[in-house]
Each structure stands twice: as C-alpha cells, then as structure tokens.
Image: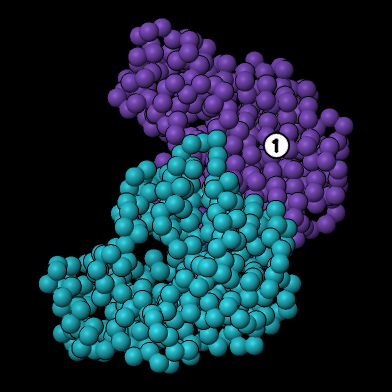
Chain colours: A purple, B cyan
Amino acid sequence: MSATITPIRRAKAPSLDPMMALVAADMHQVNGVILARMQSDVPLIPELAGHLIAGGGKRMRPMLTLACARLLDYQGTRHHKLAASVEFIHTATLLHDDVVDGSGLRRGRRTANIIWGNPASVLVGDFLFSRAFELMVEDGSLRVLRILSGASAVIAEGEVNQLSAQRRIETGEARYLDIIGAKTAALFAAACRIAAVVAERDEAVEQALDAYGRNLGIAFQLVDDAIDYASDGATMGKDAGDDFRDGKVTLPVILAYARGNEEDRRFWRDAIEGRRTSDEDLALANRLLRETGAIDDTLARARHYGQLAIDSLSGIGGGTARAALIEAVEFAIARAY
Amino acid sequence: MSATITPIRRAKAPSLDPMMALVAADMHQVNGVILARMQSDVPLIPELAGHLIAGGGKRMRPMLTLACARLLDYQGTRHHKLAASVEFIHTATLLHDDVVDGSGLRRGRRTANIIWGNPASVLVGDFLFSRAFELMVEDGSLRVLRILSGASAVIAEGEVNQLSAQRRIETGEARYLDIIGAKTAALFAAACRIAAVVAERDEAVEQALDAYGRNLGIAFQLVDDAIDYASDGATMGKDAGDDFRDGKVTLPVILAYARGNEEDRRFWRDAIEGRRTSDEDLALANRLLRETGAIDDTLARARHYGQLAIDSLSGIGGGTARAALIEAVEFAIARAY
C-alpha cells in the first residue's frame, strides 16, 4: 500500500533504530544535560519533571536535532544543550496539554496532572520552559533563540486554535492542517533547523531541514490520528478510540463527515459534541471511517507529507545519516500498517 | 509610624504619580507594543489577554524599567519592547497563578479562568510567555535574555515552592522570604536591572538597580500580605481575608503562629488547613494578629526592605527620576496606613 514512500526496498519493516544508533553517543550527552538541568532545590520539580522525562518517550525531537547535525557533519557539542532545550519545550507542552485535555494516561502511565494535580503540572511546565530558554541563552545564538522562541509562540497559538475548534464538527481540513502544523510540526521543524545554524550552513540548508521536520511532523500526527481508531492500547500507550471519546476532530473524522450522508453527519455531530461515546458508537464510527475511505486517505495524506520530507533532503549530506533520516519518515508512516 | 522610610518630608501622602508622570510618554509607546504584540489570528488570544492587560493594572514592572532607564538618562527606544516583554511575562504568570489558585476575582474583575476556563488561561499564558521571548530576541541583547530567562525560571521555581508550602503552617519566615523573593521580587529586580543593560552601564549599576527592584518587590509583597487582613475590597480588588480563607501562609500568619500559645497555634493550624474559615474565625485571626504585633512587624519588615531599596540608589542618577523611584518605595509602604 505504500510503494510511493519507500525509495529503498527493505527486507524488514522500517524502524528508528538506524537513527538511534547514529546519535547514541550524542544522546547520552543530551540525557546528561536534561538530568542536570531539570534539578532544583524545590524537590517537586525534578520529581514531577522526571516522571514524564523518564517515562519512555522516544525523544524524537532532540534525536532529530542530533541526526540533522550529523547529516551536516557538525563536529562540535553545541547541539547537546540545544537538543535538551528542545526536549524541555516539548515536555513543558506535554505537561500543559495533559492539563488542558484532562488526560489521565500518556505512554501507558498515569499523567503528572493525575498524580500531582493540575497546579503542579502548570508550574513545572513553566519552569521547564524557562529552563529551555536559559539553555539557549547559554548557547548564545540569537538565530537559534529566534527560531525556538518563534516556534514556541506558534505552538501555543496552535494549541489555542485547537481549543477553539474543540468539539466543533465543522472544523475543515485546512484549519486542521493549520492546527497540527502549529502544535506538532513547528517544533519538529525548529528541532531540525537549528542543526543547520550550529553547523553554520546557509539559509537554503536551514529551509530544507525546516521542511524535512515540518513535513515529518505532519505525517507523524496524521498517522497518530489514524492509529487512534485502529490500534490497541499497547501501540499508542493510550486506548484506541480515545480521540473519539474525547470528541476530538481529527482528519479521519473530518473526511468521514465531509463524505457522509445526512444520517452519518448527524451521528458525527452527536459524537463530537459528546452525545455518542459508547463502544457501539465507536464501532459505528470505525465502520463509517472504513466505508468512506477516511482512514486510508488520512494515511495517503501522511504519505504525501512523508514524501515531501524525504524530497526536502535532496542534495544535502549523505551516507548513514541521510539514510537514517529517510528511514525515520518511513517508520513514521509504517506504524499504521 | 514610618519616619525611617521617609527621607523627605511631604505635605501629602506618597504616590506613584511622579513616576507615572516621568514615564508617561514612554509608557504610551510600551502600550502600543503590548497591544500590537498580543494580536493573533486566533481571536481567543487577544480577547483573553486583553481582558487582563486592559484590566486596570498599574503596569508597575514595565514602569520600573522605564523609570530606571530615565534615572540613567538613557536616550534610546530599546526599553519600550523590553518593558512590554516584562509585562507579558508578568501577565503570563498572573494567568497561570489564577489557574493554580482557582481565583475568581482579580483587581475587582472576574478572572480569565472563570470566564474562558482554565485550559484557555494556561495556553494564552504560554503564548504571552513565548511572545515575551520573541520581543527580547528582537532586541538582541543576550545579557537581557540571560537576566529575564533566569528570572522566569526563578519565578516558576518560587511558585512551585509556594505550592509545596501550601496549607503548611510550619512554613518559616526564611522559607517564606525565599518564596516571595522568587515569585514576586525576581521580576521587579530584572525589570530594573535591564535598564542598566540598555543604558550600557557597568555591573555595579546593574547590581544596584537589581537590589532596588528586589527589595521594593519584597516590600510590596509584605505590605500586600498585611493589607489582606486589614483592608476592604476596594483597596485590593479582592476581599479582605482572602488569604485567610484560602489557607495561605503569609508573614503575618507566620509571626502570629510563632508567637502564639498552644491554643493559638492550634487555631492557626486548623485555619491554614482549611477547617476554620468563617467570619468569626477571620475576626479571631485579626485579633491574634493584632495582639501578637504580627501585622505591625510585617510592616516593619516591609519598611526595612523599603529602606534597602532606597539606599541601593545611593550615588546613581538624580533629579526627578531618583525622587520618583524613592517615592514609589514610600508609596508601596504607605498603602498600608
């Protein structure tokens, strides 16, 4: 089903292993920075932050900073602090997201807001966000500061935009892409772009890495949206149908609603507005998503963005780093199959 | 009662008017930056941010940046963006504070979290915080960025520290001073200090202005703590006794508890832990505060910090700016009388 995304034939499923191997030594340094800089004389801070930071995330964003630096053959160590900064921004966002969504489970573990309460999650998020900026200031590049402060503002804007669209079935595909472009893809883009800054490459390389990260981020999010309707809890660290029960308008729902007849549309409206949340309703949702091709076409969109990500690397770097970055895109897509 | 704080005899009560007059033209520019930079394509952002920003605050912190720049005879315009940045950090903090405290009223108006909900307040706070950093990055001084990112981390740390001390009657005076030094005074200090950076003055001037702001901030907070037990709603924009009913451990309570007999201590423990919140309990609290001299001595502590603030200006600048900064300290103290 995904020939268009696979430029290289593989005997086995694409994975993140090559990228993880590529950056393993660097990531060890980054983990050291993260551990050192989440400390505080106020014990609740490392306790709460550590719960999420040690909680089994892939560290996708800092990994991208490191892999892109490797792609550009950067030989220094500045990217260690900056990758930690990116992870702190991401962690702060997750802490606040879980408060905003009232989430109880992330990556299969209880969320910090459930264990320590919303106030602590809000404030420790603020602390990590400030720490992220302190790390950037220590690095001292105004260009990096501009990229990451801009991304942070865009992320927050995207989150508010999503909040405004909450439980509104009329959210169209364009607005949805705006939202995930801001709340998810902006930090992927910035994480990649700053590697070009530390490697002192020109604007064209910055833009190419930005495009790689941005399109990969959108592909990732779209596949997540599709998986939420198709997976079991083990895959996502959350239960299948969580988005449905939370009334989240994601691309599969947007497509199924657009393509549905009047009765289907009434169902989707009721579901998104929180009046149809039973297991039977979820089964009906899954049937409608299948019948309208909404899941398949969400994944087709994801493959489109994945291909854009891969193409944006044309002519930049090479060798194992380039292969690892391409396979990361293929992995992002292949998770759905 | 306050001869020690008043180096100049005045016919009328000290006020902020001289400082407001001193910076009126600059503040007009700052207000323009604030208005322009809280805009967004997502309408909820300016709507919610505007509610608080237009809500009648004194803009004390940006005013301090402007007044300190005037003290140093700074002739440029960089401080306009930076003062706006300081106000954005403060506004973000207030939005998150109100979520953390579950507040319903600020400066006599309904809080944003009551009108738009906690999720929106959290996310718009994040947006303003990011915007603050964007403004600093545009200014381009790494020294300013270091000062304000450091202050932001300290503020968040202080807030978490306060959260951990919540409803704990054993919180001592030293820890309480740590908390307000972080959550209140750090931004006052940074707001003043950055004026020395833009005016390109040496480290000694930076430190002097930092000390002015820090001590003024502590004095302000201690007077607020005292007023909360003595005022009517019109003075504070909140009701007298709010801190008591919220179980907040402030310096008046710390002193009264330390000086109380066993029965008094049992009362304070019950009150702070939320079991004594009636009007009669508040009346008893006020009597104990009076009898133990806790209010008077809280104000004596405030005068001490006020005097430190005034002394830190020795030998720096002069004229109307210096007089206005000194009168601002006297005003901070005099609010209690």
Give the side of residue B290 with respect to residue B251, left or right: left
* In this view, B297 is above or below B70: below
Q: Residue B108's spot in the image, x, y percent? A: 31, 57
Q: Residue B70's spot in the image, x, y percent? A: 63, 71
Q: Which of B162 and A278 is in front in this view?
A: B162
Residue visible at 43% across and 85% down? B10
Quadrant in which residue A39 is drawn? bottom right
Q: In which quarter of the image is the N terminus of chain A?
A: top right
Residue visible at 52% across and 68% down? B21
Badge 1: few (under 14), some or many (20 or more) residues near its Cα, within 10 Å? many
Q: Which of A205 and B7 is in front in this view?
A: B7
Q: In which quarter of the image is the C terminus of chain A?
A: top right
**Residue lying farthest bottom?**
B4
The disc numbered 1 marks a residue on which chain?
Answer: A
Q: Which of B96 and A50 is in front in this view?
A: B96
Task: Say whether residue A200 is visible.
Answer: yes
Q: Residue B160's spot in the image, x, y percent? A: 44, 65
Task: Say whether residue A53 is visible.
Answer: no
* In this view, A181 is above or below A83: above
Three-letter code, disc 1: Gly
Question: According to the image, label 1 marks what residue?
Answer: A213
**Residue lying farthest left?**
B280
Residue visible at 38% across and 89% down? B2
* In this view, B204 is above or below A315: below
